[in-house]
Amino acid sequence: MPLSVDSDPLSPPIRDTVDAVPDDDAEPPAIVSISDIHGYLEETRDALLTLRDHPDFEPVVTADSDGTLHWADENYVLVFNGDLVDRGPDNDGVLQLVGRLIDEAPPGRVRVTLGNHEWMILMPKKYRGIGWYSTERSTDERRTYLQRIADGHVIAAYDGYNVTYAHAGSPDPYVVNTVNDSLVDAAAELEEAIGTIEDGTTQTRVRQEYPQVLGTGTPAKGPDAGLVWIDFSHLPSDGPPQVVGHTRHSNPQTKGDIYCQDILQDNLQSDGGHGVFVETPESLSAVLREPNQSVTAESLA
């Protein structure tokens, strides 16, 4: 059940940038981001609750009596930076969590960037037969996810204060609203072909026509890959400031002004190590759970 939400569509500029988020508070909203959840619902809950468990932060989510997470109604924007599904045991639970937070939060306060595993929901032909959740969605489920893109709830990239957010990132500067418009255009072409004899050929053509947002690279994850596929190793240290996921590490990685937050999977067997990033106009921090379940914050920029 790919990302089903009841919220109204989001149009630019609120679709694309934190600067457009209405703010009734004296301070601009902090941006909390997490990537590469991959169907691990319990670990995701634990990572999102790090802010609740640190004395310097207000919570971004709260847990009710049965452990269900809800929007905490604090001054945040929450970015899920791609790869919500595959690998883990509860893909539907993760998608329900994200959809619930989108619906509970004010418009534009929960953003979801396209990951390469959501890419497979859009275009399953290339990876069909692997057995992943993303490649086994029905025609109607694929259409639902494409509609989330058309509605602005799933985007290619998001503009923070000093960094951009995209699942894998880019070695070169790009304009966020332009790549998001390109993703909407590509999704419209894919949706038109779903269920027809043109479905498979359209998937191949769209991947080639929109390489910046959907290109896999040659080889896959290579230096010519797009925003959801390029490997962290191909991002240069003088690349544009950005927060990315996609490439697994045990700890947050810094390369120039590029910061990788894909840490949840490599810490699955430990009692800590996972967490979130928090960006304000003045800073970027990693808020991480320690093995003893305490939470620490370390400055990244």
Image (cartoon, rainbow, N blue to C red):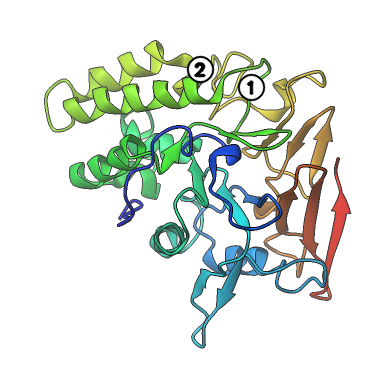
**Can you give x and y, in whole percent of width and height, for residue 262 in the image?**
67, 45
Quarter of the figure that contains the N terminus: bottom left
- At 81% from the left edge and 29% from the top edge, which residue is drawn? 257
Label placed on residue 151: none
Q: Could you tell me if residue 131 is visible in this image?
A: no
Q: Secondary structure at mark 2?
A: helix
As displayed, is residue 134 above or below residue 189?
below
Q: Which residue is identified by label 1?
A: 170
Amino acid identity at mark 2: Gln
Q: Is residue 56 left or right of residue 92?
A: right
How crowded pointer 1 is (Cα within 10 Å; few <14, some 14-19, many 20+) is rated as many
In depth, the one of 156 and 108 nearer the eye is 108
How many marks the image carries: the answer is: 2
In depth, the one of 160 and 205 nearer the eye is 160
- At 40% from the left edge and 20% from the top edge, which residue is drawn? 182
Amino acid identity at mark 1: Ser
Picture quadrant where residue 225 is located: top right
Q: Could you tell me if residue 67 is visible in this image?
A: yes
Q: Are marks 1 and 2 in contact (CB under 8 Å)?
A: yes
**Can you give x and y, in whole percent of width and height, for residue 185 in the image?**
32, 22
Q: Is residue 213 left or right of residue 139?
A: right
Picture quadrant where residue 149 is located: top left
Label placed on residue 212: 2
As displayed, is residue 183 above or below residue 89?
above
As displayed, is residue 208 above or below residue 299?
above
